[in-house]
Amino acid sequence: MKTRMRLPVVLIFSFIFHVAASQSVAQNFPTYHPLGPAKGALYRPTSGSANIAIIMMHRTGNFLSLGSCSQMRDRGFVVLCMNTRFDNNEAQVIFEEMALDVRAGINFLRQNQSGLTPGIQRVILWGYSGGGPTMSFYQAVAEAGVRPVLWGCQKRTVLFLSMPIQAIQ
């Protein structure tokens, strides 16, 4: 008779433990999102909600599982760790196109199309190594707009910059 009583108690305890553990684990792992030709791993805070997001990027390195992503998430930030379209391919880098990848990440966070990032009011651009100049370039263009540039012997306008880009406030 005692074993009959233990079975329902054990099943109920197992179910409660499983549900609690799966919710905790779900918050500790990122969700992966295509961002046009770039890709990102979204880390959401383990408790509460955040109104500040951080985009972390290297120029060509794989940043989807960088330790800093989970560390900043644990400190209460929404973190989008991104790989550019030139993931692990330094020889193919077209610097100007990486600004489009940054813009895709910012739009993903701000527009909340996925329902995963509600209430984001500020976005911090965080670049490692070649990601630093990439983030600076994006912000400079977002603030100053399009300017003619000199490439080799020809003066051209960077066409992709004519698309609206909002400065980070």
Image (cartoon, grey):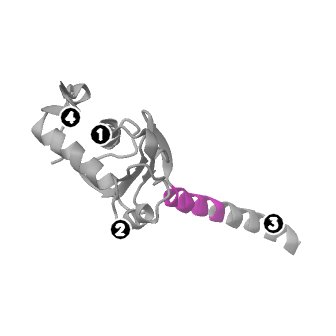
Residue found 10% across the figure and 39% down from its top: 144
Element carrying mark 1: helix
Quarter where residue 157 is shown = top left
Instruction: Indicate which disc, 1 or 3, sits on the residue closer to the N terminus.
Output: 3
Residue bearing the label numbered 3: 7
Badge nearest the viewer, 3 or 2: 2
Which residues lie in the magenta part?
17-29
Q: Mark on residue 144?
A: none
Crowd rating for badge 2 (residues with CA inside 10 Å; few <14, some 14–19, many 20+): few
Q: What residue type is labelled 3?
A: Leu
Residue drawn at x 44%, y 63% is 70
Looking at the image, is mark 3 or mark 2 earlier in the sequence? 3
Residue 154, relative to residue 169: is it above or below? above
* Residue 60 on the magenta segment: no
Q: How far apart are marks 4 and 2 (CA)?
A: 29 Å
Residue that badge 4 annotates: 165
Expressed as whole percent of the image width and height from the top left, the position of residue 39 reads 46, 42
Residue topped by disc 2: 75
Foreground residue among 110 and 130: 130
> For numbered disc 2, what is the local secondary structure?
loop
Between the C-alphas of marks 3 and 2, the distance is 41 Å
Three-letter amino acid code at the position of disc 2: Arg
The CA distance from mark 3 to mark 4 is 61 Å
Three-letter code, disc 1: Ala
> In screen coordinates, is 160 left or right of 10?
left
Quarter placement of the N terminus: bottom right
View extreme (front): residue: 153
Count of numbered tags: 4
Give the numbered dot on residue 99.
Answer: 1
Residue 26 is covered by the magenta coloring: yes
- Give the answer, above or below, for where 46 lies relative to 157: below
How would you classify the magenta stretch by its main secondary structure? helix
